[in-house]
Image: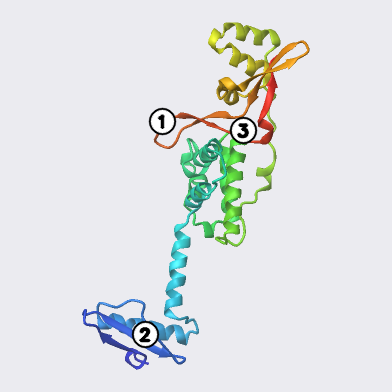
């Protein structure tokens, strides 16, 4: 059947051509106009072919599906990782900084020598909807071979898995392909060297006088360095006892070093990560 026998074309005042046809009692037209009549007739011929092959759906629905597919192909693993971490509004700035550093160094912009390993660098550019378990395994095996940093590798995997889980929740993908059992295993750590008491006292005596209190609180009272830095004058408290005064420090915040992309590093004071972090520590 010739194109002219299926549907019709007409020239618009703009000089462009419109194509339309009737099928199953409904009128349909091309979602766009065409430069020439021949191109418009070619569109009609294609529509008739889809009908003959029983592969036809309304042009507007087809266009919507094509746009949806295009959007899906543009949402890569790397782009989704960034969007996912942007959405973590409840996470502290220092925590987000750690998350971003981890995924950057292992996925988004791998540090050397992983920046030259294809199984590592290719992951970020894979469309999220096309990510497979095999892709994830290839990436995991490659970073384990390339980097002698098992704990950092595992943290990168956990961020990737969390992003995959959220993508399923938002119905961006049907299931989470990030499932490597070996990556979930805890990494055995070497026991750190613990200085002897006399070594700690030696450190304390060598510290300038203005830093001795904060040093004593860290070395002998268990404060984290960020908690000690964030102490203020009213953090020191005194309690009356039968034997006199008992002193302590009230931990109510901590300071974290933050380095925004392209900006200078600064110290951010924020509440403790957990309720247990908000406490009073007696001064011995």
Asked whether residue 248 is in view, the answer is yes
Residue 22, quarter of the rendered image:
bottom left
**Tag shown at residue 272:** 3
Q: Where in the figure is residue 260, as x and y percent of width and height?
A: 44, 36
Q: Earlier in the sequence, mark 1 or mark 3?
A: 1
Q: Nearer the viewer, residue 30 or 283?
A: 283
Residue at x 68% of width, y 43% of height: 184
Q: CA distance from mark 2 to mark 3?
A: 68 Å
Residue at x 50% of width, y 52% of height: 80
Image height of 74 relative to 50, above or below: above
Screen quadrant of the C terminus: top right
Check disc 2: other Cα within 10 Å, few if <14, some if 14-19, many if 20+: some
User: How many numbered tags mark residues here?
Assistant: 3
**Tag shown at residue 45:** 2
Q: CA distance from mark 1 to mark 3?
A: 24 Å
Q: Earlier in the sequence, mark 2 or mark 1?
A: 2
Instruction: Please name the residue that numbered disc 1 is placed on.
Output: 264
Check disc 1: other Cα within 10 Å, few if <14, some if 14-19, many if 20+: few
Task: Assess whether mark 1 and mark 2 are in contact (beta carbons under 8 angstroms).
Answer: no
Q: Nearer the viewer, residue 137 or 278?
A: 278
Residue at x 70% of width, y 41% of height: 185
Secondary structure beneath disc 2?
Answer: helix
Image height of 273 relative to 216, above or below: below
Give the mark toward the camera: 2 or 3.
Answer: 3
């Amino acid at each position: 059947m010739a194109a002219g026998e299926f549907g019709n074309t007409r020239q618009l005042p703009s000089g462009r051509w419109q194509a339309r046809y009737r099928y199953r009692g409904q009128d349909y037209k091309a979602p766009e106009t065409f430069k020439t009549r021949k191109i418009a007739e070619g569109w009609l011929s294609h529509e008739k072919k889809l009908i003959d092959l029983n592969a036809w759906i309304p042009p507007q629905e087809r266009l919507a599906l094509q746009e949806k597919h295009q959007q899906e192909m543009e949402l890569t693993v790397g782009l989704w990782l960034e969007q996912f971490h942007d959405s973590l509004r409840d996470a502290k700035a220092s925590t987000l900084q750690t998350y971003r550093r981890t995924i950057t160094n292992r996925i988004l912009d791998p540090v050397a020598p992983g920046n030259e390993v294809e199984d590592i660098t290719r992951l970020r550019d894979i469309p999220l909807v096309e990510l497979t378990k095999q892709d994830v395994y290839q990436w995991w095996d490659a970073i384990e071979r390339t980097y002698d940093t098992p704990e950092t590798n595992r943290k990168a995997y956990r961020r990737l898995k969390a992003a995959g889980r959220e993508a399923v929740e938002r119905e961006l993908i049907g299931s989470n392909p990030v499932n490597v059992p070996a990556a979930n295993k805890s990494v055995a750590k070497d026991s750190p060297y613990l200085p002897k008491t006399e070594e700690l006292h030696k450190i304390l005596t060598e510290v300038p006088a203005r830093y001795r209190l904060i040093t004593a609180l860290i070395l002998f009272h268990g404060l984290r360095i960020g908690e000690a830095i964030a102490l203020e004058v009213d953090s020191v408290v005194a309690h009356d006892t039968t034997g006199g005064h008992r002193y302590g420090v009230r931990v109510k915040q901590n300071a974290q070093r933050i380095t925004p992309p392209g900006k200078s590093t600064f110290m951010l004071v924020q509440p403790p990560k957990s309720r247990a972090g908000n406490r009073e520590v007696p001064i011995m």
